[in-house]
Amino acid sequence: MSLWNEFVACMAQALTALAHGLGNSYGLAIIAMALLVRLLLLPWTLRAAEQAWRQRQAMEALKPKLEALAKRHADDPVAHATAMQALYREHGVGAGMGSGLLTALVQAPLGLGVYSAIRQGLAGAGSFLWIPRLARPDLLLAFVVAALSYAAIALNPAMSAQAKTLLQLLPVLVSFIVVWHAAAGLGLYWAASSSVNLLQSAMLRRRLRAIH
């Protein structure tokens, strides 16, 4: 058995143990595991989001200088690129971006492992709340996930107003379509993760408000 298969098997066993400890509720177990994973990563994802906000603020402050460089080196793209890099280094723009990438690299396989473990256990999963079968899609759950995704993006202060306008609809639409066609158990995991995203946006907004 490969290392990945062993990891997924461990996640599946943990999920089963959670279900037994939560009154044999597979739905509660999925939500609990999703919240546990995302909350453990919250300090890193919150730090990465704050760094993204600081980078955007720095870029906004440098906009007049960047426009001046573009005019000065209009006929020399190489000199323009060199001058931009020097300006970014001088003001620390781009520094610290590696932490956000590292967080994503850690979160992606962990989330995928939990996702795979949930898929393995859905065959024996029953009902949860209004959902008759966790192994089948649920339209109302798709609307809930879409609403949580929209709220998390709308509250995220690290994104510019223009970026929010462009990016709000696409993730919301993608999350709705995917959850609508996926098993409801996977949709529950997505909903719990989106709830943590919403919490992260609220915490980041509060932290940045305290700074100002």
Image (tube, rainbow, N blue to C red):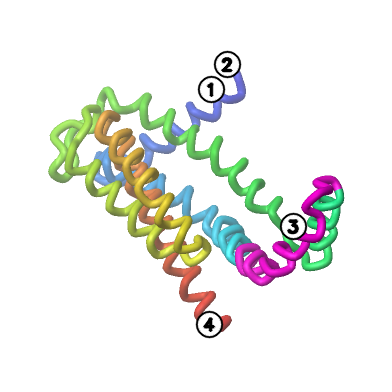
Secondary structure beneath dot 4 equals: helix
Between label 4 and label 2, give the one nearer the viewer: 4
Q: Horizontally, is 94 left or right of 211 in the view? A: right
Q: Quadrant of the C terminus?
A: bottom right
Secondary structure beneath dot 2 equals: loop
Count the numbered circles shown.
Answer: 4
Q: Which mark is residue 70?
A: 3
Who's the residue at 40% across and 65% down the image? 155
Q: Which mark is residue 5?
A: 1
Q: Amino acid at mark 3?
A: Ala
Q: Which mark is residue 1?
A: 2
Which circle's residue, 4 or 3, is located before the other in the chain? 3
Measured Cα–Cα span from mark 1 to mark 3: 52 Å
Residue that badge 4 annotates = 210
Vertical placement of residue 148 versus 127, above or below: below
Between label 1 and label 3, give the one nearer the viewer: 3
Is 83 colored magenta in this rendering?
no
Residues under numbered marks 1 and 3 in contact, where contact means CB atoms less than 8 Å apart: no
Q: Picture quarter containing residue 58?
A: bottom right
Residues under numbered marks 2 and 1 in contact, where contact means CB atoms less than 8 Å apart: yes
First to last magenta residue range: 54-78
Q: Which mark is residue 13?
A: none
Q: Picture quarter containing residue 85?
A: bottom right
Q: Residues within 10 Å of mark 4 (few under 14, many from 20)?
A: few
Q: Is residue 96 visible from the viewing direction of this image?
A: yes
Q: Amino acid at mark 1?
A: Asn
Q: Amino acid at mark 4?
A: Ala
